[in-house]
Amino acid sequence: MSPRSSELLAAARDRLAAAIAVIDDSPATALTSAYYAMLYTARAALSERDVYTKTHRGTWHEFRRAFVNTGEISAELATAAQNTQPKREQADYDAWMVPEGDAREAVDVAQALIAAVEQLFDA
């Protein structure tokens, strides 16, 4: 992987570790950290294709175009990752009390997305 992609993937792993560390005490924080792990993972993958985005929405759009439409990443996994964004926004901006199950689901999706991108790029 390129140095930039490696940095983004390392940040994703750090966010995932943070999510796991706080999941029992702060599901909202865990969900937010898991979402950013997914976002950084998508940006790391895009960086390997020399695609750069400025927004979350743009990241998910380009990720689908570059990896889901080509069959390299499953549509179900990409959808699960992308569907975490509204929950993250609700937790961050509306002080939504995230159910622990939602936080655990976000952590599981983040783990799966990181693993898929690592396998794709032998990272």
Image (tube, rainbow, N blue to C red):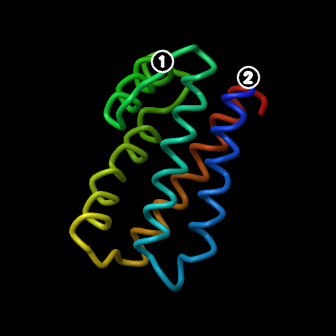
Residue that lies at the very extreme toward the bottom in this rendered image: 25
For image coordinates 53% across by 29% down, the residue present is 73
Q: Secondary structure at mark 1?
A: helix
> Residue 54 versus residue 32: which sits nearer the camera?
54
As drawn, 80 above or below 60: below
Q: Amino acid at mark 2?
A: Ser
Quote the CA–CA distance across marks 2 and 1: 17 Å
> Residue 67 versus residue 21: which sits nearer the camera?
21
Quadrant that contains the N terminus: top right
For image coordinates 31% across by 67% down, the residue present is 91
Horizontal and vertical percent for residue 108? 55, 59
For image coordinates 26% across by 74% down, the residue present is 95
Where is mark 2, residue-wise?
2
Where is mark 1, residue-wise?
66
Residue that lies at the very extreme toward the left in this rendered image: 94
Q: In which quarter of the view is residue 113 placed?
A: top right
Q: Secondary structure at mark 2?
A: loop
Residue 95 in the figure: left or right of residue 26: left
Q: Amino acid at mark 1?
A: Ala
